[in-house]
Amino acid sequence: MAKQLGRDQQGITLRGSAEIVAEFFSYGINSILYQRGIYPPETFTRVQKYGLTLLVTTDPELKSYLNNVVEQMREWLYKCIVQRLVVVISSIENSEVLERWQFDIECDKTAKEESAPREKSQKAIQDEIRSVIRQITATVTFLPLLETACAFDLLIYTDKDLAVPEKWEESGPQFIANSEEVRLRSFTTTIHKVNSTVAYKKDSFP
Amino acid sequence: MEDLEDNTTVFSTLRSLNNFISQRMEGMSGLTTPGSSQSSLQIQYQQRVQLEEQAGQIHSKSQLLQVEREKMQMELSHKRARIELEKAASTNARNYEREADRNQELLTRIKQYQERETEAENKLKEQMEMNKSYKKSMETMSKKLQEKESKLAEANETITILKGKISELQWNIMNQEMQMTSQDSQKQELMEQLDVQHKKWQEASQQIQTLQANQSLLAEYEQKIKDLEQKLSQQEHDALIVKNMKAELSRFPKMERELRQLREENAYFREMKENNGLLKEEVEGLQRKLERYEKVQAQLVTVELENEKLLGKLKSWEKVDQGTGLNIRTPDDLSRQIVALQQRELVLKEQNSTITNSARVLEKARQQLQEEILRVQSQLLDEKKKREQHEALVRRLQKRVLLLTKERDGMRAILESYDSELTPAEHSPQLNRRMREAEEMVQKLHAHNTELEAQLSQVLEEVGTHKQRAEMLEVEMKVLKSQECTAEQSTLITKEEVDTLRLKIEELEAERSKLEEENKTLEMKLEKLTLQGDYDPSRTKVLHFSMNPASLAKQQRREEQQQLQEECERLRELVRVLEGGGSIPGNLEGVGSFQSPQEIAELKKQVESAELKNQRLKEVFQTKIQEFRKVCYTLTGYQIDITTENQYRLTSIYAEHQGDCLLFK
């Protein structure tokens, strides 16, 4: 508690902002996986975060994969070289992309480790994150049903000159052929700004 | 038969004729009367005619008969001819067949001969070819023979040549043998000489040996001499060295003195060297100074030249000062003057710009004023119209007033007349009321009038103010026009620029608007694409984890598919085997069973037990049925058998015959 209070008083540093955004991605991706039914609901457990009851996975393989990606994201956010994180949901049978959750990251490059922390309260950031996550939950009402068995993939858009770390590889952008896009809320820590959009395949109703 | 019939008719006719003739004769002899002579002649004539006719008929009939006999004979002959012809034909046919057979035989023979011929020809050809080949071989052989003959001839020639050579050689050999003998004799002589020489040689060798021994002794002595000489020389050297050493030793104190001196000189020289170094540095410094001074001198010279030039310029400037009379003595003043002039220029430019701005402003004001003027004019017109309307109203009202006054006067007159006529006490209240009403009407009319007059006055005031404004604006217009005239002269040149600038401005504004629209559309597109997930490949790249859940899921699906396919194939094999009726091989059974083997064993046991039960039951049923039937037969004496379906046979013990039975359905 004292630490938190101290943080509140201290303000947002570059490292702290990277930590907040990485945490948001971790919980956000878990929510998306639960809401869209990529994994069976009984493999999720409840935790309290941002003043909400969120569901996170207990599958150890999936957990380790998410932790790896989030760790890498944290590092890259600290270096301000990541531009976008995309959750691609595709059908297993024909590898067709059905949904694309896109989080654009705008980084204020003037903020370095040595610069003074920015004035923004943790509570305000948490409120913004909470509204984003609520919105993600609410989008389920208008997104089309995922009828076939689906799997997800995480794509990260980075600067061109970044050295590709071990276990990572380059991939295509995996667009949706005939897509409808919906912009969601954004939140900002004054150093990093995260815009969310969801794109889904337009149903071909006659 | 016809002939016979014809004959009978002929005979009958002959008979009848004869009878007639006889009758006629009798008749003729009997009748002598002339009266009946004519009739008898007629009758005779008729009889003759009839007889002739009958004769003709008989003749014709006989002819017919003959013809018919001839016909028959002809037919017979025809038949005989036909038969003969048929025989001939058959014989001909047989001959023909024989000929045909012979033909065929001949044809076959011909074919055979032809085949033989072709074979013979082929053989001939082959033989010819063989012949040819043999001929060729023969030719080659002949050629070879010829070659060989030629070779033989050559060989013969060579043989002859060689024989000649041999003869020569033999002759040579003879000669050489002769020589040999002579040489042998020589050799013997030489041998003798050799012996002599040999002896001499031996003696010589002995001498040589002695000589060699002497020589070796000599050499040894010489070596000894050399060694001794060397020792001598060394000793002499040593002696010399000793002397030198002595000399040197004697020199030693001198050397020491010299050493001291040299050290002193060394130190001195070191100091000198240092001084030298210092001096060299000083020299270098002085040289540099020298160079600098020389440069400075050169610069001095140039500076002096410049000075002179500047002095000249100064003088010229002073002259200028004297010429212009602007109180310029120093360049500072000039510069100040120039600065002042520049400032003045700046000020003037500012003024110019302000003036142009004011001109623009004034133009704008003028335009605005023009617009206002237009507005005001329109307002004026409106107000004029209103005024006219009001005047018309006023006139109408005045007319009304006049009419009303007239009415009033009339009414008053009437009232007065009435008053004068009638008693005032009875009708005065009415009259008073009427009066009051009329007065009220009049007051209303007055009020209305005053109102209208007030409106009129207001309108007139407004018109007056508008007129004043118009006059003011006209005055201002005149002022502006006068100003324009003055400004026009100064801005004549700039008006064209202004026009061109305006055109440019309009074009640029149009371009700007187009570009803004394009910009908007492009921004929209960009936004849409970024929403869809587009990125700039030159600046960004897309990464993902190699072991990501989507690829893992695909892999798993593929593996599942493969497993399912393999299972499918195994099951298909099982099915084929089962359909074939073969026993389930152990491995397939183990593979194809999705139940545990324990369950299968249990089921098998159950099946076996069920079958055993079935069999036992059958046996039991059979025995029981047989017993029952026997019992029935023995007790009742009747046996019922089933022969075929739906047919039963009843037999009894007490039947007379064994085969007696009752069949019923």
Image: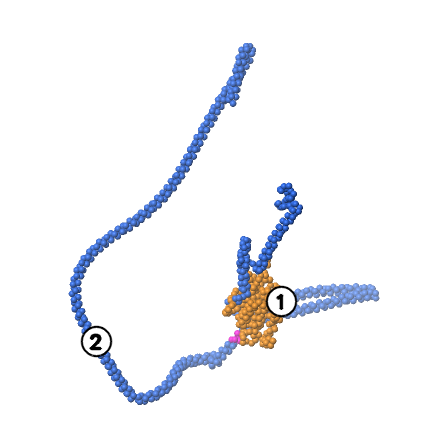
Chain colours: A orange, B blue
Residue tagged 1? B375
Residue tagged 2? B213
The numbered mark at residue B436 is: none
How far, Cα to Cα, is label 2 from label 1?
A: 165 Å
Left or right: where B185 falls relative to B132: left
> In front: B233, or B319?
B233
Task: Give x and y (percent) for residue B544.
Answer: 53, 67
Give the class, few, some or many, for how many residues have Cα within 10 Å of label 1's Cα (few <14, many ≥20). few
Q: What range is drawn magenta here? A: B345-350
Q: Main secondary structure of the magenta part?
A: helix
Where B371 falls versus B236 (above or below)? above
Q: Quadrant of residue B122?
A: top left
> In front: A106, or B132?
B132
* Mark 1 residue type: Arg
Q: Callout 1: helix, strand or loop?
A: helix
Task: Give x and y (percent) for residue B232.
Answer: 24, 83
Q: Callout 2: helix, strand or loop?
A: helix
Q: Residue at x 61, y 52 (%)?
A: B619
> In front: B247, or B364?
B247
Q: Is residue B318 visible?
A: yes
Given the image, what chain letter belongs to the residue carrying mark 2?
B
Q: Quadrant of the C terminus of chain B?
A: top right
Where B569 falls versus A153 (above or below)? above
Q: Is disc 1 on the same chain as disc 2?
A: yes
* Mark 2 residue type: Ala
Number of marks in picture: 2
Task: Give x and y (percent) for residue B652.
Answer: 65, 44
Q: Is residue B355 visible?
A: no
